[in-house]
Image (spheres, helix red, strand yellow):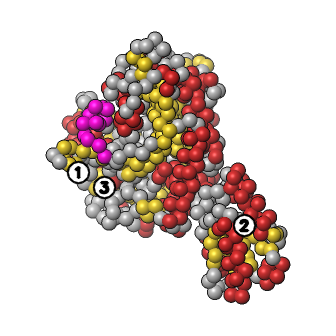
Amino acid sequence: MIRLLKEGNITELDKRELIDLIKESQAIAIKVNGVLKDLSALDSINSHDTLEIVSQNSPEGLEILRHSTAHVMAHAVKELFPDVKVTIGPAIEDGFYYDFDRESSFTEEELRKIEKKMQEIIKARKPFIRREISKEEAIKLFENLGEDYKIEIINEIEDDKVSIYEEGGFVDLCRGPHIPHTGMIKAFKLLNVAGAYWRGDEKNKMLQRIYGTAFPSKEELEAYLRFLEEIKKRDHRRLGKQLRLFDISDEIGAGLIIWLPNGAVVRKVIEDFWKDEHLKAGYQLLYTPHIAKLELWNKSGHLDFYRENMFAPMSVDEVAYQLKPMNCPFHIQVYKSELRSYRDLPLRFAELGTVYRYERSGVLHGLLRVRGFTQDDAHIFCTEENLEEEIQKVLDFTIFILSTFGFDNYEIYISTRPEKYVGTLENWDRATNALEQALKERNLPYQIDPGEGVFYGPKIDIKIKDVLNRAWQCSTIQVDFNIPERFDITYRGKDGYEHRPIMIHRALMGSLERFMGVLIEHYAGAFPTWLSPVQAVIMTISEKHINYAENIYKKLRDEGLRVKLDRENEKIGYKIRQATLDKIPYMLIIGDKEAEGGRITVRLRSGENLELIELEKFIELVKKEIKERKNIKEVPK
């Protein structure tokens, strides 16, 4: 009899019953005592082993399916391009990739040829056969095949033996497991090609990486491809250019953002809202320098734990200075500028502080991964007695800010102590407990993300979900007992003695650049009216209506609306199309009946026309919408 673990329960089956169950469940692999193995491992199972069935629809099964598809892709590439060398080909989230050493990039036409060859291999239903051989045998095998990268990997393996997989004459170094045969691949698609350095090191050779995806069914694949098309439509880099929001120039430098006039308007609206709400919440606003003496970062601990993310220091009057990667040491200095009492606490400092961090050129991505960005940063200095309450207030503030921008779904994580850290275990436990208790008090569900805290303390990370249900890391709340100790900051307590405050680091939006990128993709560039760089455009049907249109333009400007007047001598259909492409919320059309009746015709960017209304009524409606920061009918579904 064989012990089968299913949904937490163990059932004993004979081998025939097990085989029938495996066929019924469309299994592609098994777990033996918790270890993933090929289905062929059934032959070696003992009665004391515990078995689990892995179906292709499970997360582990889907990963195996995609990993096997990556092998089939490598097989197809080798058949079509024998001189290409293969490197590694793992499954990743939503798909797989394989890196190839080839001087030129693969073209779209070549990708289609590779897909066609893959279909031939799949149709042949060739089995994946696993073998364990000695390292010496493996090196000799891959030397004969001319696969230098495989030999490099083998030489780094500590075990005496390695496993290889063969299917249809193609041999690859791999731990496995794999699907039983190639015919189990039902739906796949090669997506794109990108450059990738061997082992991710810019000093190594540039390889050609082919990305693809695979699913258990064609329906799932087609749904995913539709999802990718929607992502393309919402790509903030494309929309940023179309809507003239931001630019990145090689002449200025990679990862450095230029905010164009339209983007600058949106940023101003965000900043004004952020500042007003922080003042209401009892924060004091700060501005701090962009550089400081290098010694400041040594004292804060950033040089020891964060140096690889910092730009090289510069020399000023023979003293080393550093572009700031963080704002916190500056806020510490503000705290130290006066003697502090328990009556002053909690003390809340907030700053839209621009910081600079080194990122490899290969990971830079529009607004989402940059080298210079503005954090909506704040630091709260408090006593241990009011720590939990302050965390709860920050949670409430975060949720208010996010919901105002249209984000009501999120995932919350507590990131715990990393391997490399400062401070005592006791302080780490106190800080982690305070974060957990605050979340429990607010009835907010959370998960633990082990080892992902920052070097000075644990943190709450909030990942917002956009309209496509993609998660984006933005908000963070961090408790820090350590930096106050490093800088020796104190406050005088009720007892007349000096005590050490606790420091809370927090960012609600994360960075303005990243948050703007997420906003663009969430709304597909069609911002709610309160955020839109141009809220209304006035368009005339003919030149004789310009005087009336100019009067309307002046009235709207006087009311504080962001409005544009389109005086161009073009057909009204062209003007409407252009305003729609620019995603302007309201189009005010002026013709004979509007000019004669002293009214306006209003068209929404969705294509809906409102009734002919008085200008004053329109102003009242739009100002109410802006004040409430709502535009529900304009939020993409």
Instruction: Give the CA distance from mark 2 to mark 1.
Output: 53 Å
In terms of depth relative to the viewer, which is nearer, 245 or 369? 245
Residue 58 is left or right of residue 605, and the answer is left
Location of the N terminus by quadrant is top right
- Residue 572, quarter of picture: bottom right
> What is the three-letter code of the residue carrying label 1?
Lys
Disc 2 and disc 3 in contact, CB within 8 angstroms: no
Asked whether residue 247 appears in the rendered view, the answer is yes
x and y, in percent, of residue 212 in the image: 46, 53
Instruction: Give the CA distance from mark 2 to mark 3.
Output: 48 Å
Q: Earlier in the sequence, mark 2 or mark 1?
A: 1
* Number of marks drawn: 3
Asked whether residue 181 appears in the rendered view, the answer is no
**Magenta residues, start to end:** 291-303
**Magenta span includes 299:** yes
Residue at the spot of label 3:
207
